[in-house]
Image (cartoon, helix red, strand yellow):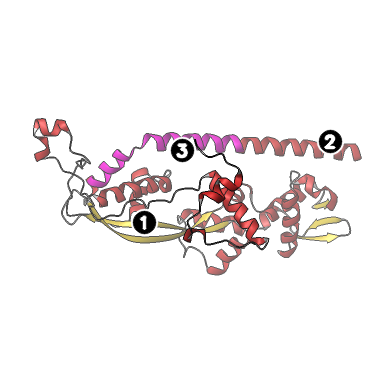
Amino acid sequence: NSQLSTINYQLSAINYQLSTLDLIQTHTSKTNSFLTIMAAVTADEIEAALLASLASSEDAVIEDSYPWSVEQTAGENAFDYHLKAIGVIKSLSADGYTVTSDLSTSFWELTPQGATVVGTGTQEFQVLKAIFEKGEGGTLPMGDLQTAVGGDKDVSKVGMANCMKEKWIKKDGANLVSLKSSLDDVTDQVVIDLKTIQESKGALDALPNKTTTALKKRKFIKEKVIKSVKVIRGPSYAPQRVKKAADLTKEMLDSGAWKTTPFKPYNLVTLGEPVKGGYLHPLLKVRAEFRKILMEMGFSEMPTNKWVESSFWNFDSLFQPQSA
């Protein structure tokens, strides 16, 4: 029996590792797909879509840039598309093509742990399921619980505590005994609540505050805030943006294109970069260090800048030979 338990534990650990590898491969595949999609969407394409959305009439407006991004991407990677769109909108506003006003949107988002729970069930549901599938007659030794749930210590510990709290199981000596006749007798309400959040696209009022507080405490959901903007036409709006030139070139002068070319405005009153001070010469640094040491020893400086030093003290007293 001991050897069989060891073998079963090893098999469960291997299955858990394989499932983890599958999750990593799936995540990597989705990440690569996302990068491919975002690389394919250029700023020029987003700019064209924004200007086209405002082209229908003078009163055309994009009420909220985030739902607009969701519409443009059909919900796929809308958040990252929106970040890119915000950069384009700021650029258009700088050139007077659009005028914006700030907005803020809050919603619930499933954490990676919450998304996993939607697929596998809560820890308590997994524990009850293990008792029915791995135990005998709805009874499972406590020592076998961690192996029965795939070797995950957190699942066994949290799941057992919540099962007892929900009165799905009880302890009977060294065994866990189910108080339910089958899995059909219980409802994994947490999974239902998480799916409700998904279906409502994270609406804050999709669930009662008490329920969302409990889900946040278990780290299944988190509140996400998206900064977005309302966009209307600006004074320089046009269906297609003409890039403004930064400098006057010889070619513009030769062809006469400078007469019709729009130029970026120059700021003639802006301050330049502050001039930074120089650095002390290495010899001056050494002299300053020696001066500091001598001053700390009690020496004082003489005001030699007031005196004219004679050649006697500088040359004769030092036996410096006089020039011929």
Q: Is residue 68 visible?
A: yes
| Callout in the foreground (3, 1) | 1
Instruction: Give the magenta part as a residue range.
Output: 24-51
**Between residues 37 and 215, which one lies in front from this camera angle?**
37
**Between residues 228 and 307, which one lies in front from this camera angle?**
307
Counting from the top left corner in percent of width and height, residue 107 is at 46, 59
At label 3, counting other C-alpha atoms closer than 10 Å, the crowd grade (few under 14, some 14-19, many 20 or more) is some
**Between residues 142 and 309, which one lies in front from this camera angle?**
309
- Three-letter amino acid code at disc 3? Phe
Residue in view at x 70 percent, y 37 percent: 17
Residue 149 appears left or right of 282: right
- Residue occupied by mark 1: 228
Please tell me which of labels 3 and 2 falls first in the chain: 2
Residue in view at x 88 percent, y 56 percent: 174
The quarter holding residue 12 reads top right
**Between residues 259 and 100, which one lies in front from this camera angle?**
259
Mark-to-mark CA distance, 3 and 2? 41 Å
Please tell me which of labels 1 and 2 falls first in the chain: 2
At label 1, counting other C-alpha atoms closer than 10 Å, the crowd grade (few under 14, some 14-19, many 20 or more) is many
Q: On residue 196, which mark appears? A: none
Residue in view at x 75 percent, y 57 percent: 160
The reply to whether the magenta stretch includes residue 27 is yes
- Residue occupied by mark 3: 34
Q: Name the secondary structure under disc 3.
A: helix
- Residue occupied by mark 2: 7
The reply to whether the magenta stretch includes residue 252 is no
Residue 182 appears left or right of 187: right
Residue in view at x 74 percent, y 43 percent: 150
